[in-house]
Image (spheres, rainbow, N blue to C red):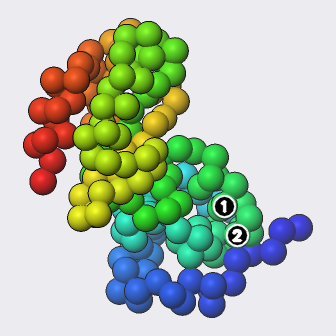
Amino acid sequence: MTKPASVGAVEELPREKIEHFDRELQAILKRYPPDRKAAAMLPALRLGQEVFGYASPAVQRLCADRLGVSAARAEEVATFYVMFHTEPVGAHVVEVCTNVSCSLCGGERIFEYLKKKLALANGQTTRDGRITVREVECLGSCGTAPAMLVDEEMYERLDVQKVEQIVGGLK
Ligand code: FES
């Protein structure tokens, strides 16, 4: 039997944001049977990331606490899926696929170009906190490679000029 996360473990999070999180989580939990709320871990973490900026260990503990599961369970999920950011990220997150199809169509070139242009290594954020660049696995858009996600919006059939335009337009 796993031990649920303790409430005290989330005290470092801003109270008003916790209240916001709790309100939104209640709406999500209406879709789950009361004895199955642990199954809401993905939407809970997604909500936590949206409210607090990233799925930090404290956010993971908050989700675990509210869903009545162990902190380890939340950590497992948060660290398994690449859409969860467990470290702080910039205002915009640019995720470039360099898996096989994208790589063959120029994905790696695009990724290298972006890192050079922004003077970043994989996973780093610009000094002004504006843009984080990450290399990711297949985005499910192999037929229209190369592809990248910007703040969860998909861009396909990319080349360096298009990437320049898209990233240049990020405020
Ligand atoms: S390999 Fe890039 S989207 Fe599938």
Q: Is residue 143 left or right of residue 39?
A: left
Spot occupied by residue 132 in the image (x, y as percentages of width and height): 35, 51
Secondary element at tag 2: helix
Image x and y of residue 21, in percent: 41, 73
In this orientation, which residue lies closer to the viewer: 135 or 154? 135
Number of marks in picture: 2
Q: Residue at x 43, y 28 (%)?
A: 97
The local crowd at label 1, few if under 14, some if 14 to 19, many if 20 or more residues have their Cα within 10 Å, is many
Residue 42's disc number = none
Residue 30 visible in the picture: no
Q: Are circles 2 and 1 on residues that touch, CB within 8 Å?
A: yes
- Tell me where residue 46 sits by quadrant: bottom left
Observer-nearest of 110 and 99: 110
Vertical relation: 22 (above or below) 48: below
Location of mark 2 (residue): 71
- Amino acid type of the residue tagged 2 in the rendering: Ala
Q: Quadrant of the N terminus?
A: bottom right
State the residue at coordinates (62%, 53%): 79
Compare residues 166 and 46 and report the one nearer the observer: 166
Query: Counting other residues with Cα less than 10 Å from the Cα at mark 2, is it few (<14), some (14-19), or many (20 or more)?
Result: many
Residue type, mark 1 in image: Glu
Please give the name of the residue rendered at 43% of the width and 81% of the height, measured from the top-left corner.
Answer: 18
List x then y, in percent, for residue 7.
Answer: 62, 86
Q: Is residue 46 visible?
A: yes
Image quadrant in which the C terminus is located: bottom left
Q: Quadrant of residue 130?
A: bottom left
Which residue in the protein does label 1 denote?
A: 75
Q: Position of residue 136 (x, y in %)?
A: 48, 35
User: In the image, is residue 23 above or below residue 141?
Assistant: below
